[in-house]
C-alpha cells in the first residue's frame, strides 16, 4: 500500500544538554499523541536515537502540510533557546542554526505497524536516503522523492520556497504558523498565545501565511 513517510533530524542537536534532549523528547511525544486528532491528518510517528524522527502519513496528499507543521512545531520549541552562554552572540548563533532537516518519501510500505513500532518499505527507504543526501551535501533542509520524476521536481521547487521562508522565521512566527496550519482562526490563536488578534494578523503577514497556505493547497492537489 502506498504511503508517505517523513524522515527528519534536528540540526545542532549535539550541542544540547542531556536535560534539553529529555525535554525535547517529551515535546515530540506530545506532537505524536495530540496532533493526529486535532490536525485531521492520519499519521503516526516515533523518535529514533533521541533526535531523529520518522513518521508515516496515511494521507499522501497531506504530507507536505504535515512536514511543515512538524517544522513549525520544532522551531517554536522555546526551552532550547534559553541562554546558555555568557556571550550573547554565541547564544544567538546557536538559535539561528537550530532547526530541522526533513525528507519526504512516497511509495509502498510492506510494514506499517504503530503497535510494534515497525516501518519497512520503499517509502521509508526513500525518505531515509533523502535525509542522508541533505546531511552529506549540505543542500537545503527539505527533499521530496517518489516514483513520479516530473512531479518530484515540481514538488521540490515549491517545498524549497516554503522551506526558505520557515528557515528565516523566528520561533514566535513559527508558533503562529503552526496553529494556522492546524486550522485555527486568528482570534483562537490570540487566546492560546495570550496576545491580541491584530498581533496574530501582523505575524501571519510577516511569515507570508497566505502564500504558504496557497502553496500547500496546490501541493495537496498534486501529490498522490
Image (cartoon, grey):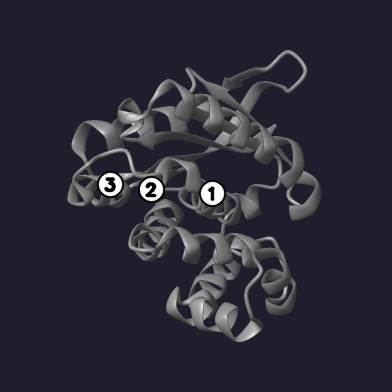
The residue that label 2 is drawn on is: 142
Residue extending farthest right: 37
Q: Position of residue 187 (x, y in %)?
A: 72, 78
Q: CA distance from mark 2 to mark 1?
A: 9 Å
Of callouts 2 and 1, the N-terminal one:
1
Of callouts 3 and 2, the N-terminal one:
3
Q: CA distance from mark 3 to mark 2?
A: 15 Å
Camera-near label (3 vs 2) is: 3
Q: Nearer the viewer, residue 152 or 47?
A: 47
The residue that label 3 is drawn on is: 97
* Residue ID at (45%, 58%): 171
Q: Position of residue 52 (x, y in %)?
A: 47, 27
Relative to 50, say whether 100 is above or below: below
* Residue ID at (57%, 66%): 176
Numbered label attached to residue 67: 1
To which quarter of the image does residue 107 belong? top right
Are the residues at dot 2 and dot 1 in contact (C-beta closer than 8 Å)? yes
Q: Is residue 97 left or right of residue 146?
A: left
Residue 160 seen from this side:
yes
Relative to 182, say whether 77 is above or below: above
To which quarter of the image does residue 170 belong? bottom left
Residue extending farthest front: 86
Q: Position of residue 124 (x, y in %)?
A: 52, 28
Amino acid at each position: 500500500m502506498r504511503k508517505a513517510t517523513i524522515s527528519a533530524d534536528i540540526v545542532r542537536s549535539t550541542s544540547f544538554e542531556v536535560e534539553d534532549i529529555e525535554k525535547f523528547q517529551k515535546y515530540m511525544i506530545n506532537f505524536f499523541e495530540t496532533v493526529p486528532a486535532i490536525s485531521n491528518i492520519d499519521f503516526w510517528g516515533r523518535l529514533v536515537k533521541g533526535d531523529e524522527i520518522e513518521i508515516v502519513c496515511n494521507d499522501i496528499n497531506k504530507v507536505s502540510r504535515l512536514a511543515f507543521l512538524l517544522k513549525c512545531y520544532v522551531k517554536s520549541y522555546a526551552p532550547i533557546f534559553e541562554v546558555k552562554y555568557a556571550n550573547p552572540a554565541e547564544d544567538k548563533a546557536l538559535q539561528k542554526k537550530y532547526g530541522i532537516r526533513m525528507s519526504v518519501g512516497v511509495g509502498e510500505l510492506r510494514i506499517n505497524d504503530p503497535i510494534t513500532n515497525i516501518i519497512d518499505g520503499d517509502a521509508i527507504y526513500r525518505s531515509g536516503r533523502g535525509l542522508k543526501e541533505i546531511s552529506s551535501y549540505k543542500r537545503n533542509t527539505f527533499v521530496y522523492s517518489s516514483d513520479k520524476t516530473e512531479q518530484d521536481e515540481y514538488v521540490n521547487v515549491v517545498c524549497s520556497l516554503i522551506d526558505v521562508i520557515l528557515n528565516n522565521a523566528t520561533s514566535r512566527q513559527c508558533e503562529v504558523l503552526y496553529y494556522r496550519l492546524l486550522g485555527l482562526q486568528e482570534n483562537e490563536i490570540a487566546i492560546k498565545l495570550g496576545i491580541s488578534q491584530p498581533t496574530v494578523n501582523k505575524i501571519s503577514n510577516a511569515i507570508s501565511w497566505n502564500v504558504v497556505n496557497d502553496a500547500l493547497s496546490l501541493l495537496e492537489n498534486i501529490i498522490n
